[in-house]
Image: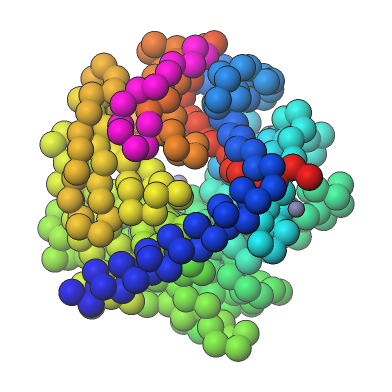
Amino acid sequence: MTRIASVSSRLLASAALTVLSAAGALAEDAETHYRLFIGDHAEGVVRAIDAESGEALAAFDIDMTPALTASASGRFVFAVQGDAAKVAVIDTGIALEDHGDHADITLADPALLEITLTGTKPAHVVEGSGRIALFDDGTGDVTVFSELGLLQGRHAPETLSPGAAHHGLAAPMGDYMVVSVPHDDPEQPRVGLKVIDKAGAQIGEVMPCPAVHGQAQSARVFAFGCKDGVVFASPGQAGAAPDLIHVPTAELGEGNVSTLKGGTALQVFLGNYGPDAVVLIEPGSDAPFRKIDLPTRRVDFALDPVIARNVYILTEDGQLHLLDILSGEIKQSVTVTDPYSMDGHWRDPRPRLAVAGDHIAITDPLQGMVRMISTETLTEVRQIPVEGVPYTIIAVGGSGATH
Ligand code: ZN
Ligand code: ZN
């Protein structure tokens, strides 16, 4: 019960904050804008689309089908092209600037930056404490840079070499970074996580986290998926190194967490667990895990940054499920696409989802469109035709004053 109570009070607090900031924005001329950035499944193209009008704003030619990640502010989208050894950087053209009691929103054309991040096999991009860390699986090196540097045309990346090549990750936390640790034998799975300082020197012992994969941040805490549990990293007191704890997931049965998403208004994580379940994760709770079984296998999931208690999960039967974080129950299920079987290659074209304000934007690759679903009713309100085979998707934007 304490668990629910603490989440509820945080939700109430965040709801009050949302109301306050909305009132501040309404006092002036408030505008809401969202843009969708869509990676093509067949070709190296990222398309920018206005989420409201459906207007195609730009199409950026890159080298291959990208994995897409947005910066925390939504100002940039990173198009990771591991096999092409590159990361393209797209300026989304939407800037939200904090003015204390309200935000200002300004719009410009989306643009592909001239700067391309390079590496041997770049993969995970993780942002924390105002720093962005790109892990190069081909070398084990971590490239660290800031969004401010990109904005001001002063891109000055630093490179750290914390270990050997592996499919890894690095999470910036204050002056420190949590990085994955490979096995001495490159054929063996990753063994865990370690903390390094700004110079790359290891602090403390390696925290075991077998086959570590997947990370997310929520309210300054990072969570990492392990074969046998989840590791939480909390910021240290008074500038000290982060504290890492490992919490086993054995009680949940067969499966493990290897993909995570973090809540923005609530301190909560959502992870995968086996092919047909998800797990709600609350760090610091006596019972941190709540597993939710799904009717069929999972295709993708997303947390709602506005309606903080909502999680949306798409399953292979084409159903979109609304999961309530507070009750841990699926409240509503609606059919939104034709079935997309999880049989076949994991990279086959299947829908992906992103939350854009009060809409869930779902790519429907075989129909060549994005379906816009209301977060209030879970009904489809419009379809946006998209050229090619729309696949990966990122939504950026928000509301702000224009004065
Ligand atoms: Zn202002
Ligand atoms: Zn990965």
Residue in the picture at 77% in, 33% down: 108
**Which residue is rendered at x = 48% and y = 30% of the image?**
392
Quarter of the image where one finds residue 298: top left
Identity of the residue furthest to the bottom in this view:
238
How far from the left and from the top, in percent, is residue 271?
32, 53
Residue at figure coordinates x 37%, y 77% from the top left: 245
Relative to residue 60, is residue 123 depicted above or below? below
Instruction: Give how far across and how far down residue 371 sits, in percent.
Output: 41, 21
User: 377 or 128, which lies in front?
Assistant: 377
Q: Is residue 174 left or right of residue 312?
A: right
Query: Which residues, given as a range, are shown in magenta?
Result: 374-386
- Is residue 40 shown in magenta? no
Q: Is residue 23 visible?
A: yes
Residue drawn at the location 60% of the way across and 31% of the way down: 35
Q: Relative to 332, is 3 above or below?
A: below
Left or right: residue 234 versus residue 257 is: right
Task: Say which quarter of the image contains residue 321.
Answer: top left
